[in-house]
Image (cartoon, rainbow, N blue to C red):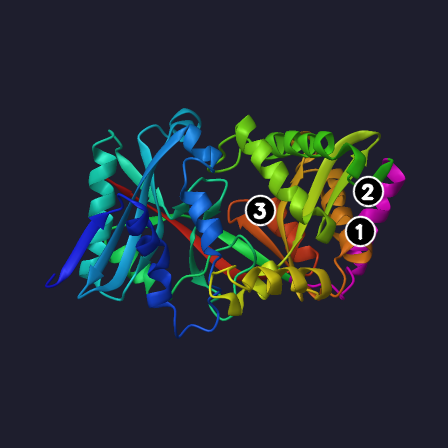
């Protein structure tokens, strides 16, 4: 490893180097979207991210001959120890040049930190919480990532697997042309549901915004509690999410489905603001913020993303549950799609979630990207 220097982040200057590593690696990748450095800094900060109320993390970066060549984070989340497999730590924020020795050194630095905290296995990438960006892109490199989704270089999979990691699970991103209607078969399912139950689809009431979103999160907990990797968000994380959602609600939508008066499901759609970030180079100063605000106000996104969708557990695997999901998608497509949007990404969907995958494919969505989570015993 001639010339390779690997350090743990210890101060502000190191953190800036850690955050800037992707700029040295993705320069020739037209699909890469430079993230806003201020947002990355807040995510990594124990002062701003409520994740750190129940988790610890360390950051490592590598350079060769003064040039950044890699980085990795290592995390231990106490909620993962309680709700998933005890002794499981995470790695995340992984970026690396195409050299196995560099990748091995980064993985070993993270593993050593995790072993010192009694972890027996490592899983990732997880950036940083299981409820944030997870998985490594292994299929679908040509299209730029949607908001809050990752993008990676094609050789990363080889680096990870050669380092001894194995597949844990795959996550799918589905893509749909929103101008295309449902098939006759799907229309019949929704018509059947309308004859069997009283279903009402509506947008969240902005005057009761906080209450409505907490009800949405209650459905989310119920719908997702048996899924792979589920870790319930804390009250602080819920408050943080609600504040973030408030900023984009006017440009997106949150729809609720009520069945016989009971809240049965929901769908959230966000404009793909990544379309506005390509030329900002990760910076809002001195004039990046003005360009971003102008685009948010006067421009339209070609693509939107559905990051969250859920149906109460008692309706899942039933015709009513399928109709709830399809009606939410169809109402979103017909009435609440942000102005000018042409395509919708629905991500991510677990490969093991056969009912939801069936609904996506029945609705005319195509599997467009695959993200993989890896694991390894320590």
* Mark 3 surroundings within 10 Å by alpha-carbon count, few (fewer than 14), some (14 through 19), many (20 or more): few
Sequence-earlier tag: 3 or 1? 1
* Residue in view at x 67 percent, y 36 percent: 316
Give the mark, 2 or 1, whose residue is nearer the N terminus: 2
Question: Is residue 220 at least partly visible in the picture?
Answer: yes
Above or below 78: residue 29: below
Residue 177 image point, x, y percent? 69, 66
Q: Secondary structure at mark 2?
A: strand
Residue 7 on image: x %, y %: 20, 49
Q: Is residue 144 left or right of residue 74?
A: right
Residue furthest left as drawn:
2
Say the numbered circle drawn on residue 331: 1
Question: What residue span does the magenta drawing correspond to?
Answer: 176-197
Residue most extreme to the top: 82
Q: Are marks 2 and 1 in contact (CB under 8 Å)?
A: yes
Residue toward you, 103 or 50 = 50
Q: Alpha carbon of mark 3 to alpha carbon of mark 1: how far?
A: 23 Å
Whether residues under marks 2 and 3 lie with C-beta atoms below 8 angstroms apart, the answer is no
Q: What residue did someone put label 3 on?
A: 354
Residue at x 21% of width, y 32% of height: 116
Left or right side of 149 for 180: right
314, 87: nearer the viewer = 87
> In the picture shown, does residue 62 fall above or below 227?
below
Circle 2 residue: 201
- Residue 296 picture quarter: bottom right
């Amino acid at each position: 490893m001639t010339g390779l220097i690997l350090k743990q982040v210890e101060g502000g200057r190191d953190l800036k180097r850690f955050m800037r590593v992707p700029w040295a690696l993705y320069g020739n990748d037209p699909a890469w979207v430079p993230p806003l450095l201020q947002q990355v800094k807040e995510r990594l900060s124990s002062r701003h991210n409520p994740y750190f109320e129940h988790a610890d993390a360390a950051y490592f970066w590598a350079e060769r001959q003064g040039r950044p060549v890699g980085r990795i984070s290592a995390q231990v989340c106490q909620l993962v120890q309680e709700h998933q497999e005890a002794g499981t730590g995470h790695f995340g924020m992984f970026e690396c040049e195409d050299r196995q020795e560099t990748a091995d050194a980064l993985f070993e630095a993270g593993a050593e930190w995790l072993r010192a905290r009694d972890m027996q296995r490592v899983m990732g990438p997880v950036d940083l919480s299981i409820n944030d960006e997870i998985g490594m892109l292994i299929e679908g490199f040509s299209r730029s990532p949607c908001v809050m989704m990752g993008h990676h270089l094609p050789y990363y999979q080889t680096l990870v697997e050669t380092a001894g990691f194995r597949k844990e699970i795959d996550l799918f991103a589905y893509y749909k042309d929103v101008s295309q209607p449902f098939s006759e078969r799907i229309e019949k399912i929704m018509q059947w549901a309308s004859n069997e139950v009283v279903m009402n689809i509506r947008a969240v009431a902005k005057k009761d915004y906080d209450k409505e979103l907490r009800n949405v999160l209650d459905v989310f907990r119920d719908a997702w509690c048996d899924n792979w990797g589920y870790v319930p968000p804390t009250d602080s994380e819920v408050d943080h999410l609600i504040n973030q959602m408030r900023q984009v609600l006017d440009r997106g939508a949150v729809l609720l489905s009520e069945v016989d008066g009971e809240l049965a499901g929901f769908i959230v759609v966000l404009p793909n603001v990544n379309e506005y970030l390509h030329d900002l180079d990760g910076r809002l100063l001195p004039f990046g913020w003005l360009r971003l605000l102008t685009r948010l106000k006067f421009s339209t996104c070609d693509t939107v993303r559905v990051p969250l969708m859920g149906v109460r557990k008692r309706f899942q695997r039933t015709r009513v549950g399928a109709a709830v999901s399809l009606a939410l998608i169809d109402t979103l497509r017909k009435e609440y799609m942000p102005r000018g949007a042409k395509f919708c990404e629905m991500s991510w969907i677990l490969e093991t979630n056969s009912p939801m995958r069936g609904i996506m494919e029945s609705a005319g969505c195509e599997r467009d990207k695959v993200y993989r989570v890896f694991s390894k015993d320590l």
